[in-house]
Every structure is written in structure tokens, then in C-alpha cells.
Image: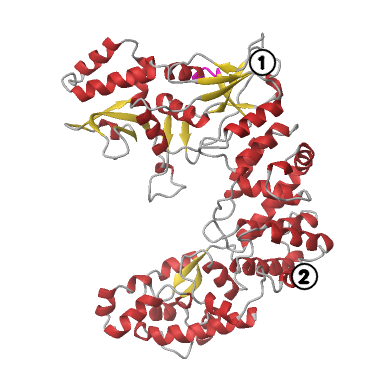
């Protein structure tokens, strides 16, 4: 390092550091987490800069050219897309020159880079995630004519589409913030103001001149340059400086350490892309890096499965890396199995409940046909029942290791079939018991439409349904009919209206229907729809039995109270048969 010592360096301008990022002079070490700031945080950062508030110092790490190939580096994100482009691209580095890596300040520098050189695409409210039009490309703009309406801010910054930025009136003139770097002299600022008939507006002049000074002239980037080439020291510095402010999540930190210690594979690239793969299964899930890293500890039979730095040591990392392909296959099978039970990101209330399933499948050698083959049919039935009960009893809330550890031991001792009874027996009498009481059964009847645990309860009632096909939670009597004015129009008495409205969303007015029949049913009168789809007496009898409908009771909407109470008793009796 030519004798250079770690020290604070001469500050540089935002324009200089942005151009350095653009030229790949500054990169991100693999121990860094990914970009997590939202648009509001970026706007607050620029408001702080404009107001002369301190934005904190930065920590850079100069990696000598002879050490460059010992580490993995990533580029900054320029065009952020919430769905399609939120992972940093791997940097193509050579050993021809030193590299400056960012140890602290990545979120701020990425925000500045996106604002001045790139775009920020986040999902519009009320649009589906799979809709490409839900993520319009936006740039950061500054309104030169008005202050912010947000009392916390002074300057009116906003991320806008090109079309939105065209809006102009006596209070709005949007200036694309990134264009300020193209101005070399103050005179060019005044020329711009004159060309756009803004020179007479003092606020506009002050705004643009201030932005020019903040970005192009003021040396706002104060940084300490670390020159040590010892990875252990750099890791310790990284952990220390990221222990305050917007803290690294444990998964970010542990993934950083894993990335630095894996030798054959890139842990960060492998795990982040695998999380994406898992989340595309079935109707989509929302797993994160924590889930995968926790599975790495459990499935690699690491004795202490606690989620802490000490367990991500060199020895354990080697073991996890060696087992990685098997871990991936196991988790794919496990999530596919849970998806076949009908679960998705809305109904899976504890991802940790999947871990014992994964450990069991791994213990059987990862059979690729586990989810479909009749050979494993009984195993799947047993696992499904255990899974439903575990979610309903919230067995993995609090301290999941106290549940995972003994279950792993039980499975290890006997893995010929899923040890449902032994697991039940192990936790009997504890606060993690999977046995149900009369009160527990009564509580199941209080679950409501769309709530997380409702599907688990309904799933118990439909043991023969092939839930790989999409099933909806359907209101037997349409929810849209339960508005006061509509109830009055249907001549429901005033004393019964509250009963109708209080009970519309409970389990006793919900059935599981496949997607297409549910769409066809829609808001139809239930009695009429029931007669349409069930032509014969046998069909009607079978439908009533399948959905726990009191067949001797009228399905008229005016008879909702009697229907509801009788169906409630039928469902309660079924729960009692299953659980007591």
C-alpha cells in the first residue's frame, strides 16, 4: 500500500464520488448487505443536504491489487426496480489496480447514485406484483417553485415519471436533479433560469443555486480510508460500524460472513437467488435470507442451531457449503409440499414450521418424487396434519429453537415415517403442546375470513381436497349482501341486522371452493346457486356432506341465523372428532 496509513482523507464532492461510482472506482465488498432504502429515505437525505445538515462520515476500504482476487465485489445499483432489479450485479475486477470498497455508507451512496444517475421503480399501490405496469420508471425531481408540504421537510423533492414531471403551473416546476451535474459554472444556472422564465422567482433561484453548490462544489463526503488487508480486522470493523443506526439484520451480517468464507461458491449470490426461486413456488411465498440461513444450520446438523455469529465460523461454513446443493433440493421439495397443501404467502403464518419437514425429507435422502408419488402418500397426510396443528397452536412462536432442537433429535432417531405421535408426546404438558382442549376448539370457530390462521383451520375440515389446485375462502352467503341498507332492502328485521353483520366473516359462513366455481358463484344467492350446480339428490347430499351444510335447514338468506348456528355445531363436532 506504499506505506499509506489508515486515516481520514481530504473530503470530496458528491459529484466526484458519484462519477467515481459510475466509473467503478468504488465497489461494494461481498460482506455488504443489499440496498434497502425506500424513496422517502432518499428524499430526506437530499433535503438534509440542501439544508446543510450533516449526513455522517463514510468508511472506505482500499484493497491492494495483489489482494483484489481474494475477495468478491459488487457494483452499485443504478436503476433500482423493486421486483426485477434489486440485487447488486457482480463486479468484474482485475488485479491491475487497487479497489476502493465501501464499508460504511453504502445506503447513502447508492441513494445519491440512483438520484443523480439512475432511476427508482417501486410498485404502485393497488396494483398486482406480477403487473409489469405497476413499476413505472421514476427519477428524482426538485420543485423549484414551492416548498414541501411535509412539515419535516423544507424542499419539495419527489420521484416522478417523465410524464408526471411535465406538470407545470404557478406552484410547480420540476427540475430533474441529476441534470445539475451537467452544469459547470453558476452562470449556466442563471441561463437555465432565464430560459425557463424563472429568473424572477427568488425561491427558484435559491433552490437551483443551492443544489449546484451541494452537489458540485461543497465537499460533503467526509471519509475514513482503511488500508488493512487482514480480512478478520476488516470484518470486525464492518460489524462494529454497522452496529448502530439502521442496523444490519442478522441475516445480512451472517450472509456477509458466509460470503467471505465460502471458497467454491458465492454465498450471497447463491442464497439471494435461491430465496427468489423459493418465493416463485405455487402461489408465491415471502421467504427471506433468515429462513434459508436457519435451514443451513439445522439441515447441516450443526449442534448449536442458534442464529448467532459464533455459529457461522469457518468450520461450519465449510460444512454448509459442502451441503448446499442438498439443502437447496430439500427446501425446494419442502416448499413444494407445503404449496401442495394449499399454503401461500398469505396463509403461511410461520416459515419455521417448514424446517422439521425439510429435515425429515433430507433424512430420507431427498426423494425427488416425495411430493407426487403414492409411495409417500401416508407420509404426506401425516405431515400435513402435523403442519396444520403446529400453525394453529403457534408452536414456533417465541423461541423456535426450543421446538426445532428436540424435533430434529426425534427425526434423527426414527426417520422411516414422519414421527407425528412422538412429537406430540414430547411436547405434551408444555407451552408448545400440540394437543387441543375444548377451549381450543371453540377458538377455532372464531377465526375470520382472510386471517392468517383461518386457512389452517379450514384445511382440517377438507382432508380430501387436492389443494394443489387453487382454492378460495368463499363466503357461503355473499359478503356484499351484509350491508345495513341491503339487509333492510331484503327485509331483514332490525333486531337481526346486527347478528348478520357480526357473523358474516366467521368460519361458519366460509367454505373452500376452487377458483373457477368461486368466480362463477360470485355474489349469487346461495340457495339458487346450490340448486344450479347440484342437479340430483345425490349431488346435493354429497355437497352438503363435503361442506358441512345442515341439509334439513333452509338455505334462504332470511334463514341465515338458523343456518349459521347449525353449521357451527356441525363444524365444532368435526373439530372435536379430529382434535380431542
Q: Using the image as rendered, state which of residue 32 and residue 85 is in the foreground.
A: 32
Q: The C terminus is located in which quarter?
A: bottom right
Q: Using the image as rendered, state which of residue 436 and residue 456 is in the foreground.
A: 436
Residue segment shown in magenta? 21-25
Image point 66% across, 9% down: which residue? 3
Secondary structure at badge 2 equals: helix
Prevailing secondary structure class for the magenta stretch in the rendered image: loop
Residue 469 image offset from top left, x and y in percent: 56, 63
Category of crowding for the residue at label 1, using alpha-carbon neighbours closer than 10 angstroms: few (below 14), some (14–19), many (at least 20):
some
Q: Is residue 530 magenta?
A: no
Residue at the far right: name it.
413
Find residue 434 and report its image quarter: bottom right
Image position of 41 with respect to 578: above or below: above
Residue 214 image offset from top left, x and y in percent: 36, 20
* Side (left or right) of 120 relative to 234: left
Residue 57 image offset from top left, x and y in percent: 49, 25
Residue where numbered disc 2 is placed: 422
Answer whether labels 2 and 1 touch (C-beta < 8 Å). no
Image point 73% across, 34% down: which residue? 262
| Mark sitting on residue 64 | 1
Find residue 159 and report its image quarter: top left
Residue at the far top: name it.
2
Category of crowding for the residue at label 2, using alpha-carbon neighbours closer than 10 angstroms: few (below 14), some (14–19), many (at least 20):
some
Is residue 220 something that shows in the picture? Answer: yes
Amino acid at each position: 500500500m506504499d506505506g499509506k496509513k489508515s486515516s481520514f482523507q481530504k473530503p470530496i464532492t458528491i459529484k466526484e464520488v458519484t462519477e467515481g461510482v459510475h466509473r467503478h472506482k468504488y465497489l461494494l465488498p461481498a460482506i455488504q448487505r443489499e440496498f434497502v432504502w425506500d424513496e422517502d429515505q432518499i428524499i430526506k437525505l437530499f433535503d438534509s443536504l440542501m439544508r446543510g445538515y450533516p449526513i455522517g462520515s463514510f468508511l472506505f476500504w482500499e484493497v491492494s491489487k495483489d489482494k483484489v482476487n481474494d475477495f468478491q465485489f459488487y457494483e452499485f445499483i443504478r436503476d433500482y426496480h423493486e421486483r426485477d432489479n434489486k440485487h447488486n450485479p457482480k463486479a468484474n475486477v482485475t488485479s491491475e489496480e487497487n479497489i476502493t470498497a465501501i464499508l460504511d455508507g453504502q445506503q447513502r451512496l447508492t441513494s445519491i447514485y440512483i438520484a443523480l444517475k439512475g432511476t427508482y421503480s417501486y410498485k404502485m399501490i393497488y396494483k398486482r406484483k406480477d403487473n409489469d405496469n405497476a413499476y413505472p420508471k421514476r427519477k428524482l425531481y426538485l420543485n423549484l417553485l414551492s416548498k414541501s408540504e411535509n412539515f419535516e421537510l423544507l424542499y419539495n423533492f419527489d420521484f416522478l415519471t417523465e410524464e408526471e414531471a411535465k406538470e407545470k403551473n404557478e406552484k410547480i416546476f420540476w427540475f430533474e436533479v441529476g441534470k445539475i451535474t451537467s452544469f459547470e459554472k453558476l452562470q449556466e444556472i442563471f441561463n437555465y433560469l432565464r430560459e425557463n422564465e424563472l429568473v424572477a422567482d427568488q425561491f427558484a433561484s435559491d433552490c437551483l443555486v443551492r443544489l449546484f453548490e451541494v452537489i458540485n462544489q461543497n465537499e460533503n463526503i467526509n471519509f475514513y480510508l482503511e488500508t488493512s488487508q487482514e480480512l478478520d480486522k476488516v470484518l470486525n470493523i464492518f460489524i462494529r460500524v454497522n452496529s448502530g443506526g439502521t442496523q444490519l439484520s442478522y441475516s445480512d451480517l451472517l450472509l456477509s460472513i458466509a460470503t467471505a468464507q465460502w471458497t467454491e461458491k458465492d454465498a450471497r449470490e447463491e442464497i439471494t437467488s435461491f430465496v427468489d426461486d423459493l418465493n416463485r413456488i405455487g402461489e408465491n411465498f415471502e421467504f427471506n435470507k433468515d429462513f434459508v440461513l436457519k435451514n443451513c444450520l439445522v439441515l447441516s446438523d450443526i449442534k448449536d442451531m442458534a442464529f448467532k455469529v459464533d455459529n457461522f465460523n469457518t468450520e461450519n461454513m465449510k460444512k454448509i457449503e459442502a451441503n448446499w446443493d442438498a439443502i437447496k433440493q430439500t427446501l425446494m421439495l419442502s416448499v413444494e409440499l407445503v404449496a401442495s397443501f394449499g399454503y401461500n404467502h398469505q396463509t403461511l403464518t410461520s416459515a419455521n414450521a417448514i424446517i422439521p419437514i425439510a429435515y425429515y425429507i433430507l433424512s430420507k435422502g431427498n426423494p425427488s418424487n416425495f411430493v407426487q408419488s403414492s409411495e409417500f402418500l401416508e407420509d404426506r397426510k401425516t405431515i400435513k396434519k402435523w403442519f396444520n396443528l403446529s400453525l394453529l397452536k403457534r408452536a414456533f412462536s417465541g423461541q423456535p429453537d426450543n421446538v426445532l432442537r428436540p424435533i430434529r433429535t426425534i427425526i434423527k432417531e426414527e426417520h422411516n415415517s414422519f414421527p407425528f405421535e412422538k412429537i406430540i408426546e414430547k411436547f405434551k404438558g408444555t407451552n408448545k403442546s400440540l394437543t387441543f382442549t375444548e377451549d381450543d376448539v371453540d377458538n377455532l370457530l372464531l377465526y375470520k375470513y382472510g386471517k392468517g390462521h383461518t386457512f389452517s383451520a379450514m384445511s382440517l375440515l377438507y382432508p380430501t381436497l387436492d389443494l394443489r389446485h387453487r382454492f378460495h375462502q368463499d363466503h357461503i352467503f355473499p359478503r356484499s349482501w351484509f350491508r345495513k341498507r341491503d339487509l333492510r332492502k331484503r327485509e331483514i328485521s332490525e333486531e337481526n341486522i346486527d347478528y348478520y353483520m357480526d357473523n358474516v366473516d366467521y368460519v361458519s359462513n366460509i367454505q373452500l371452493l376452487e377458483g373457477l366455481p368461486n368466480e362463477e358463484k360470485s355474489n349469487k344467492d346461495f340457495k339458487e346457486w346450490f340448486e344450479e350446480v347440484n342437479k340430483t339428490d345425490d349431488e346435493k347430499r354429497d355437497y352438503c356432506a363435503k361442506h358441512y351444510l345442515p341439509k334439513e335447514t333452509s338455505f334462504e338468506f332470511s334463514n341465515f341465523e338458523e343456518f349459521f348456528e347449525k353449521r357451527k355445531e356441525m363444524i365444532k363436532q368435526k373439530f372435536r372428532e379430529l382434535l380431542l
